[in-house]
Image (cartoon, rainbow, N blue to C red):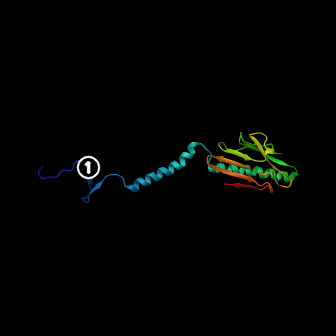
Amino acid sequence: MNGETALSGGHASRGESGGTRAAGFTLIELLVVLAILALISAMVIPRMLGGPSTTELRSAARQVAAGLRFARSEAVAKRQEARLMLDLEHQSFEVDGDARVRALPRGVGVKLFTAQADLVSDKVGAIRFFPDGGSNGGRVTVFAGERKYEVDVDWLTGRVSILD
């Protein structure tokens, strides 16, 4: 080999400036790729699980709150008791005097806390409103996994509010 030095088997290469540079990825490039993968998985995985979105869950809570407010207004307007009947098994509800049954979005769970006298069965219960606008009080919880919204009914005033 006449005094020449041979470079053997490495990952080094000669750049145009004459120095050597290791081939591969920088730490910054790896972090950018990992951040993009994390962002994509955060958006895709919840959709693949098939559960309701936060918007659908919030919409279900608003739907129940609207039904409760309607029942209260019916009790005051007609000067007689009105109830919102909640079917936990079928995730639906109806208001006295309104023949429509309103179904909650698929995948949304429902819990009811109300007076013992207003439990029709272990799967059906009611929240009652009186002609003066008051109520027996109670709470309807709509949930999906760890996320939940509570629709609260004040027993004295009949006021309906949504708590996150």
Amino acid found under the numbered disc labelled 1: Gly
The number of callouts visible is 1
Task: Name above or below for residue 154 compared with residue 86.
Answer: below
Q: Classify residue 150 as left or right of residue 21.
A: right
Question: How would you rate the neighbour count of disc 1 (Cα within 10 Å): few for under 14, some for 14-19, many for 20 or more?
Answer: few
Q: Which residue is mark 1?
A: 10
Quadrant of the rendered image containing residue 123: top right
Quarter of the figure that contains the C terminus: bottom right
Outermost residue toward the right in this view = 79
Q: Is residue 15 left or right of residue 72?
A: left
Disc 1 element: loop
Of residues 134 and 37, the one nearer the viewer is: 134
**Residue 9: where, in percent of width, then height?**
24, 47
- Furthest residue in direction bottom, as rendered: 17
Q: Name the one closer to the observer, 13 or 82.
A: 82
Residue at image position (49%, 50%) is 38
Q: Residue at the spot x=87%, y=51% of the render?
A: 78
Side (left or right) of 88 relative to 117: left
